[in-house]
Image (cartoon, rainbow, N blue to C red):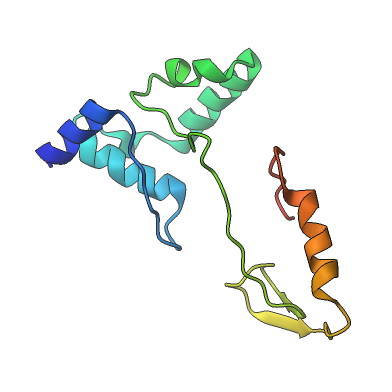
Amino acid sequence: MSQISSLFKVNGIVAINKPVGISSAGALRFLKQLWFPQIGYEHISMDYFQYIDKKFYEQKSSNKINKVRGLPWKVGHGGTLSYTAVSALGYFSDTMDIEGKITQKAPYQQISIEEILSVFSKYEGDSMQTPPM
């Protein structure tokens, strides 16, 4: 653990390859407990974080969030956020993703590869993420 802790302090940035099924919050909770056991973050309620988030958004200053929260770390993608997607045409699921139960099938043979590729340009570049539901 001391090697991990010293690595964290020396480099300041930790890249995490998080497996599917573990939330980002869960991964961070694990790391916080590993690196900062004396602080006891596991006992802080979600109400506290919601209150702090509300205060942060009232301030409308993204560089103050860690000062407001009093946290010794930043969370972010460092400008390296990119996605790789794989899809199967003609399937609908109850969760709108691969993990859901297939609820409906539809024909897709009439859709050409050119039509699919023409849609991709809408999703390239800088944009705000919008939840699917």
Q: Where is residue 65 drawn, in percent x and y? A: 50, 20
Can residue 37 be seen here? The reply is: no
Furthest-left residue in view?
2
Instruction: State the quadrant of the N terminus.
Output: top left
Q: Is 77 situated above or below 66?
A: below
Q: Residue at x 39, y 49 (%)?
A: 26
Residue furthest right as drawn: 110
Image quadrant occupied by the C terminus: bottom right
Residue nearest the viewer, comparing 1 with 120: 120
Q: Is residue 29 rendered to the left or right of residue 94?
A: left
**Which image quarter: residue 81?**
top right
Name which residue lies at 77% across and 83% down: 104
| Residue 35 horizontal/vertical position (percent) | 22, 36
Most foreground residue, 43 or 116: 116
x and y percent of residue 51 in the render?
A: 54, 25
Give the camera-side residue of 85 and 75: 85
36 vs 93: above or below: above
